Amino acid sequence: MRIKKFIGSTAKEATDKMRQEFGDDAVVLNTRRITKGGLLRPGGTEYVEVTAAYDEEPIKVQHRASAPSRPASLPDDMLGNLRQLTSRFEEKRRTEVGRADSPISIPHAVASAENEALKQELSEVKSALGEIAQHLKHSKMPVLTEALQNAYSALVENEVEEEIALEIVQACHNKISGNQIDEQSAVDGYMLNSIARRFPEAPVRRLGRKGYVVALVGPTGVGKTTTVAKLASIGKLVRGESVALITADTYRIGAIDQLKAFADIASIPLSVVYTPDEMIAAIRKFSNYDTIYIDTVGRSQKSADKIIELGRFIDAADPNEVHLVLSANFSLSTVRDIYKKFRSLKPNRLIVTKTDEAVSLGMLLSLAQDSRLTFSFVTDGQSVPDDIEPANGDKLARMIYKVGAEANA
Ligand SMILES: Nc1nc2c(ncn2[C@@H]2O[C@H](COP(=O)(O)OP(=O)(O)OP(=O)(O)O)[C@@H](O)[C@H]2O)c(=O)[nH]1
Ligand SMILES: [Mg+2]
């Protein structure tokens, strides 16, 4: 029995290496993403590490009677495999080195070299067991077929958190039937479905009511003003609504001019408000318009008092929808921090901007899980009003789980 880790820049590369050395009977115990740093690579480089076991006598995986081609599920079957591995290890130790209390003498140098080799093997077994224990903690991870392993790697490569990636693969494994589990395209279809269902659906807006108020809030520079302009143009030009604009961003130099220039071109009325009372008055003034869009000042999530001050404007506007605007370029930890700090403004929608610039969008799944909020729009460029689309689970799933040609684009 041998246990070894194979590292590759993709899961495929690592499993190819595994097959080259261990052949087709190898059992994958664990797949995970790792970062290796270095003096010249302070950020580190991402690799995929596959831990595999191999024995001359193939390890028997228990198949379910109802689905013979389906791989067995952890923990029972995987634990069974592990027990086999451990007992073979013990056997080998006994036959090769002799019992510790054996009176038969083995030349000292040979014995210690063999001991060293065994120690090394034991530590590899221990580390593999540790990793598997980690997996078991998170989920009843199935022994993955290649198609499911590829699916898992595609998620992790797109920076989906490992725990969430495992849940999605497990959900896919549970739903998929018979031989489909070996077909990449079938697995991909189920994966997209499982991902899409993790995004809460949008509540339906009641039509025909005047004075519907939509406010955008968020950190500095994420694209709030640009997105307000896109939404207002689409409301007016595409849906034929009457639309009005309010800006509460009187802080940044040029902010008013930015929205005023747009409002003039699009012939949309704009009110600039300096106080919460002026906000109340502006909302009243526009109460006969179908939709009133409010642009607000960008606030760093680090300045709590400024967010409280912004909250007074939002309270005065009493909006139907508060969209928290986040850039797809933010890391998961930044997004979590922003969400925590802007929660006081009671956002009930999320907008993701700059998806055209983002490398990966896996963090959106974590954000959906943490906030339970609906994603309303995604924006993918600077053009008003073209570069915006309504968000929904299917669209977000396709952005996160890129398969086939898309993945290599
Ligand atoms: N690539 C890309 N750029 C965008 C997108 N949305 C907005 N931008 C650009 O991002 C920059 C900032 O946009 P703004 O709309 O001014 O951002 P803001 O959130 O209003 O900024 P503050 O009011 O300063 O907080 C501008 O250069 C926009 O053109 C997008 O979807 N993709
Ligand atoms: Mg702005």
Image: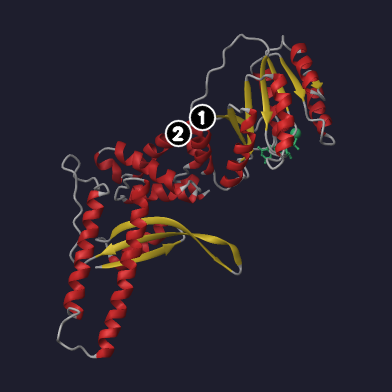
Question: Could you say where residue 138 lies in the image, as x and y percent from the top left?
Answer: 38, 47
Question: Could you say where residue 48 lies in the image, as x and y percent from the top left?
Answer: 44, 58
Q: Residue at x 23, y 49 (%)?
A: 76
Q: Residues within 10 Å of mark 2 (few under 14, many from 20)?
A: many
Q: Are marks 1 and 2 in contact (CB under 8 Å)?
A: yes
Counting residues from the N terminus, which is met first, the one under dot 1 or under dot 2? Answer: 2
Q: Quadrant of residue 287?
A: top right
Q: Amino acid at mark 1?
A: Asn
Asked whether, in this view, residue 167 is left or right of residue 291, the answer is: left
Q: Amino acid at mark 2?
A: Ala
Question: Could you say where residue 24 lies in the image, as x and y percent from the top left?
Answer: 26, 61
Question: Could you say where residue 105 lies in the image, as x and y percent from the top left?
Answer: 18, 89
Q: Which residue is mark 1?
A: 392
Q: Is residue 319 above or below residue 86?
A: above
Q: Quadrant of residue 86?
A: bottom left
Q: Is residue 294 above or below residue 395?
A: above
Q: Nearer the viewer, residue 121 or 204?
A: 121
CA–CA distance in space, label 1 to label 2: 8 Å
For the N terminus, give its image quadrant: bottom left
- Local SS, label 1: loop
Q: Which residue is mark 2?
A: 196
Q: In the image, which disc is placed on residue 365? A: none
Q: Quadrant of residue 375?
A: top right
Q: Nearer the viewer, residue 199 or 242?
A: 199
Q: Residue at x 19, y 67 (%)?
A: 88
